Structure formats: C-alpha cells, structure tokens
Amino acid sequence: MYSLFLELYEEFAKAGSADPLGETLHAADILSAGALRKTGRSLLEEKGISTGGIAALRQTGKPLEYILGMAPFMGRLLHCAPGALIPREETELLAGTCIAAIKEMQREKRDITVIELGTGCGNIAVSIALGTENVAVYASDVSAEAVEVARRNVELFGVGDRVSLFCGDLFAPMKGKGLEGAVDLVVCNPPYIPTSSLEKLASEIIDHEPVVALDAGAYGIDIFRRLVADSPVFLRPGGVLAFEIGAGQDKLVARLFNKSGAYENIGNYDDGENIRVFSAVRK
C-alpha cells in the first residue's frame, strides 16, 4: 500500500492538485477499506483505472468515491455511483443509533420491522441488516438509479433475505403491504439543505451528486415535516422515528416534534460539535 500511496501522491502533484497529500489520504482511506478483501492496487485493476486516471478525473471535480466506484461506511466498502448520494462519516451516528435502538427492542426476543426512507446506496439498510438479527428492512428511494446501486450492495453483502427495496416517494411504496401500525423503526437520512444554500456547496457536491438528495426546500425542513407527520401511520405505539439533520437545525426539528403531539421521549445525538440525529417514540 505504501508504494501505491507514493504513486498516488506523485500523480496528484503532477496533475496540479491544490492538495495532493489530502487527495492521496482520501483515496488511500477508500482503498484501504477494501484491504481485507484484496489489495488497493488489485482494486484499481478491477476497476480498470490507473493512478494517473484517478488524478486526472479529480481535476475535473469528480468525487473520488464516484471515480473508484466505492465508498467506505461503518468499516465496510460499498458500491457507489453518481445516481446515489455518497455516504458520509457523520451518517454513521444515525446508523449506530438505529442499531442500538433495535438491540434494545430485541430484549423482548421478537422480530423487528424497519422502514428506511431515502436509502441512497443502501448504506444504512445494509448496516442495520448486518448489525442486528431477525430484522426485516423495507427500504425505498425516489430515484430508480439509487435503488439500483442499493440493490448491488444488498447483493454484495448477501442481505437480500432481510432487505427489500422499492422505488417511490417516501412512504408511497410502503402502502398496502400490511405495514401500517406495525413498524418498529422508521429511519431516514433526508435532504436537509435549504434551496438557497445549494449554490454555496462545493462544486464537486452540487455538480456531481444528485440534487434530489440534497434540496430540502426553502428552510431545509420539507422532508422533516413529512417524516414527523406521516410516520405515526406506520409506527406501532412505542415505535421509533430517527433521522439525520443539518448542523443548527435542532431547534426547528424540536418544534416540529412538539407541535405534532404524536411523540414522546424526544431525544437527540451530537457528533461532538452539533446535534445531528433526532429520535422520538410514537405515543
């Protein structure tokens, strides 16, 4: 891996990267996540791309995860493609919160039903399926391209018996499946960026990642409103709603929950700096 690291650094520097070391470290992080399966160099050979090709594509602004077709999440290497949002490290807090909640529920020794909305590449659904037992995950995304990426990850990790995928807007694909009032956990990593702030995002995000996974309306809370309003139809009494929020949105989200009146035990989780996850129990 050391020789590959040096080669990557040299190629990024040769291509005129403003931060060749940072780019090299980022690429090495992604490649090393697959080291248990194969070497970083053999992963590149499998993808049919050279270190020089990586550096050249990065100069166009294309994210490394899309160039390599892979992204790490919770210690696993997942398929990643432009039709789905790139998994972020901060979303591991949401996934971990959900896994902990499921394990607490399973003290009752029963099967658990989960709905994940906006599954993207399937990183949360796959993590829940691998991190818990006796769980059925119903995962949906409005983007058919994202669902196809998620399907590849479900197959990659062999969790097709635990994760079912659907294409549609939020809860729409879940209707008529006998899930109303029977779900233990609804989880979502929703869009939460205000429309007016999209233009302020780094070009490699706004020019390459799906806007539908980023844009959350004028105040960045359009999907939050829908989650809080619609989840009680599917959650059983005592079921949990959990979702990620943007930095500084916690007061707005707390108001939505309090105004709803359908929840109790409203809690939040921070990443050491900002509150990034909210959860609440259906009354």
Image: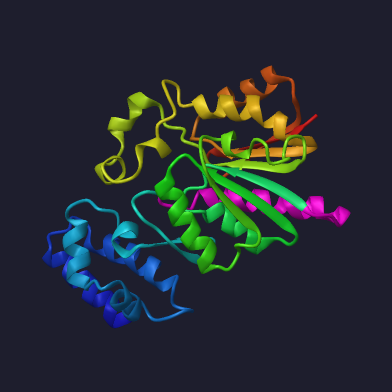
Choose top left, top right, bottom left or bottom right for residue 17: bottom left
In this view of the protein, can residue 112 be seen by the observer? yes
**Pick the front one: 210 or 6:** 210
Q: In the rendered view, would you say 16 is above or below 260? A: below
Give the percent coordinates (x, y) of residue 243.
59, 39
Question: Which quadrant, please, contains the N terminus?
Answer: bottom left
Residue furthest right in the image:
108
Q: Residue furthest front?
A: 176
Point 35% across, 76% down: residue: 43
- Percent x, y of residue 46: 32, 76
Answer whether residue 272 is visible to the viewer in this image.
no
Q: Nearer the viewer, residue 172 or 49?
A: 172
Q: Please give the name of the residue rendered at 60% of the width and 30% of the height, measured from the top-left corner.
A: 227
Q: How many marks?
A: 0
Residue 93 among magenta residues: yes
The picture places residue 258, in percent across and down from the top left corner, at 69, 21
Q: Is residue 8 above or below residue 218?
A: below
Which coloring applies here?
rainbow
Q: To which quarter of the image does residue 181 belong? A: top right
Taking the magenta stretch, the answer to whether it contains residue 101 is yes
On screen, residue 42 versus residue 147, left or right, reads left
Q: Is residue 159 left or right of residue 202?
A: right
Vertical placement of residue 227 versus 27, above or below: above
Up the image or down, 102 lies above or below 232; here it is below
Span shown in magenta = 85-111
Q: Which residue appears farthest toward the top when viewing the image?
A: 259
Q: Main secondary structure of the magenta part?
A: helix
- In the rendered image, residue 283, in percent from the top left (x then y), is placed at 80, 29
Residue drawn 28% across the image and 46% down it: 208
- The residue under the point 63% across, 53% down is 96
